[in-house]
Image: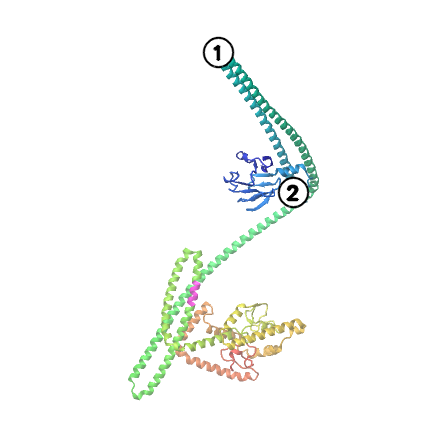
Amino acid sequence: MENNVPYLISTKTLKPEFDKLEKISITSQDFSIGRGLKNSVVIPFLAISRSHCIIRKTNHDAWYIEDYSSYGIEINGVKLGRSNKKRLQHKDIICLEPSQEFIYLFIDPFQENLDNSCESPRKRIKLENSDNDIISNVKMKFEHSQSCEIKHIEDKILNAKQMQTTSMILKKQLQLEMNRKIEQLKHDYTLQIENLKGEKSAVEEQKAKLIEERDNLLTTVKKEMDGKISDLMEQVKKHHETESELIIENNLLKEKLLKEREEFLSELNRESSSKQDLLGKLEAKIREQEEIRLNEKKELEEILRQETERLKIAKEKELKELEDQKKSRELELLEELNELKKNLESKMEQAEQQKLQVEQVLNNQMEQMKKVNDEEKLKMEKLVHEREELQKKLADAQQNADKSVEELQTRVRDRETELAALAAERIQKHAEQSSEVINSLLEQLERVKSQLRSVENEKEMLKAVNESGEASTKENTLAEFTDIMENELQCSICAELFVSATTLNCSHTFCKYCITMWKKKKKACPICRASITSECKSLVLDSFIEKMVENLSEEMKQRRMNLLKSREELALELARRLNSNNSRGSSSYDESDYNSDFDEGGEEEEEDEEYSDIGEYDYYSRRRHSFFDEYPDSGSDNGSDDSISLTSSASGHSSTSNAASVNGEIAVAAGVSNTAEARSQRGIVRGTPGSYYGGYGRCFRCGARGHWAPGCPFK
């Protein structure tokens, strides 16, 4: 039965402690292998799992192996995978662990007998025309399979020799036992005979009986021994016959295997001789390519090293520059904080002085009113009127103070955020150096905050007086907001809010459609006359305008929607014309839309002459002053301080400068009316004083030249 059982035989010599594991007989249908003691075969090796694998037999006499190892099992060089199973074929090579210490060959005796009885002609391995490695692999596999077969035959011969030696040993043991028993019997009977010599007469009969018994026992023992010896001799003869047959078969198989090996090697040499030339050429080419690649790699490494050094130097310079900029920025911020503190203190002093002056005037008036008699009622009324005017002036001064305080608060908050960001960066890089600076800055900020709190308290006191006028201020702020939108976010060509704003290289911004139509007549900026070299779409302006339009009235929103639709239609018409018309058609455009705004060169020259008295400097200076009046925080840092001082001086002397400003406005209006008559004869009407006009185009409200819609005197 054991000869028909499949087994695993090691393909390499194992270590002395694993000699018993060179051959593993699979004695059960569920045969387990592992490091645990409950397995059928225990392999005490760390790479072997506790329950490594199970070799299981199915109903169809097929053997399957299931992998439960942690490192994996390879069958014929292919990894099986955990909890997967595969059918085992005869002479499959099983590698139990990755270090390849335990590599076994699966032998199925039933399949081996079938192969020996009807040995089919082996298929020759089809060599792929790849390279010498495949040929060497095929040789190794062929030699390995032949060596396994030879080893199997030698194992059979060794088993037969072992059986023969065991039978010879048994024969010798039986002969020794027989001789020992005979000697023992002789010794016993001789002792009995010697003891019974004295009794000759009575003992002779017993002697005869004992001799007969001895002879009978000797004959029976000899017969038994002869039977056993004959059986052993027959077994020895059979073993000799099987041994001779096995030796003959072994020699025949060795001759066959050697012939097959020689034929196979000759074929391989023939095929490899032709391939070796190709391989030599390929190796030469590969060497050349490797040399080229190495040279390129060295060059690239040198270039990379040079670039990295250059980048390091540049980064160090940039870091130094950034540190210098941060230091200078910190100094500037500190100076600005000091200036803000001084301005706050000066404003607080001015506000206190104004309050004291007003209180003194009121007290004086109250004293005078007490002393007045019935005859002086007219004077009392005058004084009451003056008192009301003074209260109005006081309210104006308080409003100006509130505005200045709010502006200062916003600026202080901005400076606080900037200082906090700079302090955070400086803390990360220079924590030790910046701690003292940050503490001093925080102390200064706390002082400023305390001053702001005091100002806010005063502002709350003033707010209690001016709560009634908040609704009107909101409306005024909304109106101011719309005016700012119209003044600052309008296209200079169409006098509308920007539609897909496009910024030129000179930093002036126009509508996309307007500037494309303008460029058909002149490739220069409509404002500064600089040549147009580049255009950039301003997404920030578009998104800002759309967000701000949402806060406007419904009428303005509807007007904006209509404008966008009309611009889309005009853009589509322009694209159609550009695609369909010839060169003349492409240069022409819708004169009904822009002929009134873009006349020929002579008319433009007339307009330039008419408005030459304004001057380029006057235009930019007026625009700058109006911008700073509306946005006092939008200028540079130095300009912001100037604006603060201007507002403070204006608030301080508001009571004296109101009359002068009114007179100045009347004078400007008179001058405008004088020139408007002359210009209206040629279709030119000057706009409201202080409104912005670029020197070209018409008003979309009244259609006259000389002003745009925000400064239309007829609105």
> The magenta stretch spans which residues?
411-419
Residue denoted by label 2: 134
Instruction: Classify mark 2: helix, strand or loop.
Output: helix
Residue 79 visible in rendering: no
Q: Identify whether 629 is placed above or below 50.
A: below
Residue displayed at 53% across by 20% down: 181
Amino acid identity at mark 2: Ile
Q: Identify whether 446 is placed above or below 572.
A: above
Residue occupying the far bottom of the picture: 375
Query: Is residue 377 found left or right of 568 in the rendered image?
Result: left
Give the crowd class for mark 1: few <14, some 14-19, many >=20 residues within 10 Å: few
Amino acid identity at mark 1: Glu
Give the crowd class for mark 2: few <14, some 14-19, many >=20 residues within 10 Å: few
Q: Identify whether 656 is placed above or below 230.
A: below
Q: Which mark is residue 390?
A: none
Q: Identify whether 268 is placed above or below 618.
A: above
| Camera-side residue of 715 and 668 | 715
CA gap between label 2 and label 1 equals 97 Å
Image quadrant where one finds the N terminus: top right
The picture quadrant where one finds residue 57 is top right
Instruction: Classify mark 1: helix, strand or loop.
Output: loop
Query: Can residue 144 be found in the magenta stretch?
Result: no
Residue 144 on image: x %, y %? 63, 37
Residue denoted by label 1: 199
Mark 2–mark 1 CB contact (< 8 Å): no
Residue 244 on image: x %, y %? 65, 28
Q: Earlier in the sequence, mark 2 or mark 1?
A: 2
Magenta stretch prevailing secondary structure: helix
Residue 336 on image: x %, y %? 42, 66
Residue 15 on image: x %, y %? 54, 35
